[in-house]
Image (cartoon, rainbow, N blue to C red):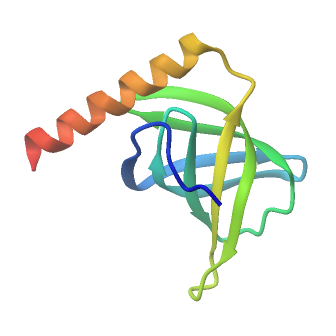
Amino acid sequence: MDNKREFFRLELKDEDVTVIHPGGKEAAMIKDISATGLSFEAHYEFVFEWAILLFQVNKIKFERKALFVRRNGLASGKYFYAVRFINFDEEERKKLFQAIMQEQAKKLGNG
């Protein structure tokens, strides 16, 4: 399996993401994000193919439809997920990428 990533990924420790799915909605914590997807941990086991994700990067709100591409149970009892954003255009991708880069610049400036 090819593990090359097309876009820069920003580590976002413990940033909230709301996962809206056919059974309702759940809170989770983002681990990292790129312009094309993100990974997160949750207490809830998602068995759906896709969900709507609500999250913020650099104080900008985003809503993305996402396809689950990886699911792992963790020793802590939580679940780890990786998702790929789907059904969004190039302008939306650029907006998210810019927010990610601005957030990274802030972290480097404070680090």
For image coordinates 31% across by 30% down, the residue present is 101
- Give whichever of 105, 78 is nearer the camera: 105
Query: Where is residue 74, by image quadrant?
Result: bottom right
Q: Is residue 26 above or below residue 8?
A: below
Left or right: 104 as drawn, with respect to 45: left
Left or right: 63 as drawn, with respect to 66: left
Q: Position of residue 94 (x, y in %)?
A: 47, 18
For image coordinates 66% across by 49% down, the residue present is 83
Q: Position of residue 60 (x, y in %)?
A: 43, 25
Q: Residue furthest top?
A: 91
Q: Position of residue 24 (x, y in %)?
A: 83, 50
For image coordinates 56% across by 17% down, the residue present is 92
Q: Residue furthest bottom?
A: 75
Q: Position of residue 106 (x, y in %)?
A: 19, 36
Where's the N terminus, which quadrant?
A: bottom right
Q: Is residue 51 above or below residue 58?
A: below
